[in-house]
Image (spheres, grey):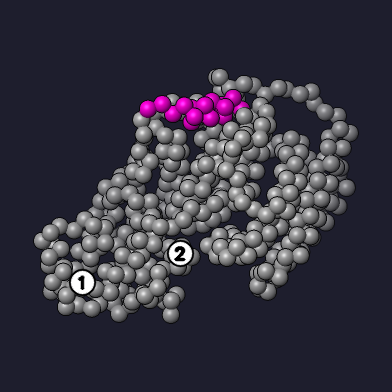
Amino acid sequence: MACSQFINSIHEMVDGTIGSIRRAELEMHLAQCDDCRALLEDLRKIHDAAAALPVIEAPDRAWLQIAGRLRQEGRITEHVPAAGAKRRSVAVWLAAAAAIVIAAGTALVMLVPRTPPATQTAGTPAGTAAPAPSVEEVQTKVDAAQAQFETAIAELEKVAKANQQALDPGTSATIEKNLNILDDAIAQNRVAVKAEPTSVAARETLFEALRQKVTLLQDTISLINEMRKGNNAAAAQLVNKS
Amino acid sequence: MATSKVTAHPSAVPAGGPRTAELELVERCRNGELGAFEELYRTHSGRLYSLAVRMLGNPADAEDLLQEIFLSAHRKLDSYRGEAALGTWLYRLAMNQILDHVRSRAARSGQLTDGLDDASLLADASGHRLADRAIDRIDLERAMLELPEGCRAAFVLHDVEGLEHKEVSDVLGIAEGTSKSQVHKARLRLRGLLQRRSQ
């Protein structure tokens, strides 16, 4: 029989679902066919490697965005730190920098809601309706949020630059190029906000550019971390993501 | 294409009995406690994100979908009664959203059972031999991204997630024979791709 007639049997052998008669026929063929023996061995390797693939952790920013959306939609009534929550093991300096980013992100979400609050479902405590703040109060909070973003960016830039030698020159150049693009966008948006200080859209665009810069810097630091730990799988995920 | 929905995952069979800790956690989430929902997220996000990345073949889409999955889960927590383990409930919810995404993308680009040419795969499979060393998981992940969507979905569900062909066919709304064919084609294509990477 031609080898092509045994392909399905080889897959069934890999899956462990082959019947005894087909198995006996296949084994007779394998005894005299090097190519089919190699195919069986390789498909087993692929099957076993696929079954053993590790969990890929989601980027840190995914949770921040979920938390922001929940707050925006009025589905959070308090902020209580997760007791006993599993935390990803990252370097202390990254955790410190991220804390600043979380604080800035929280302020932004409170100030620039993008969607109307969701209708409260039965049994869900309603969010407390605060009186509308004055323009001056909003401006002060916007300035504070912007300052927090800028502090976070400065901290992240310091860390990224000090450790950039861990990256290959090509990756480093791409990151640098993207940071320059974001810097240009931030500068242009600052001019727009200055021209129209009361425009929510202008502020939102500026904050989006700032947020993107924070994200890029966080990814850069995560990449450096993973490269240093020799975790090539996680590094590849980050590179694919960017 | 059928629009079957996922009902369970074989590796997450409900254990039965009270799930006091999970129900307490869910209750805290329902009460709007962000820390409780973060705990739920930290426990389950890795597995669901991995599934989404591998099924969609795109980390950016997977990240967006992960957010939608957990936001949807938060909205639907009122319907969680503890009949199934929380992980099973979330897996089911995630898989349905991932499949909706895959189906809508397949509807735009062609069909979910898009195939690989049998003759070229058999030619690809002959004479190629992987090196004696174990398969590098990064190489495998990258090679999986090169599979056509239908092949990749069936391969991920069967070989990575461990579903049986009958379950894969139910989930994807395809015939059981098609599931087998897609997985077989995926393995042969992966062999060719991995062999080229190891040269």
Q: Note whether residue A208 is visible.
A: no
Residue A77: x and y in percent read 66, 26
Task: Say which of A7 and A116 sits in front.
Answer: A7
For residue B137, the mark is 2
Name the residue beneath numbered marker 1. A4
Task: Find residue A240 and report its image quarter.
Answer: bottom right
Above or below, A75 against A122 in this view is below
Left/right placement of residue B171 relative to residue A37 reads right
Residue type, label 1: Ser
- In the image, residue A175 sits, relative to residue A198, either above or below, namely below
- Which residue is at a point 56% across and 50% down the rendered structure image? A58
Q: Report the span colored magenta.
A: B17-32
Q: Which chain carries label 2?
A: B
* Nearest-to-viewer mark from 2 and 1: 2
Residue B85 falls in image quadrant:
top left
Residue displayed at 79% across by 55% down? A155
Quadrant in the picture for residue A41 = bottom left
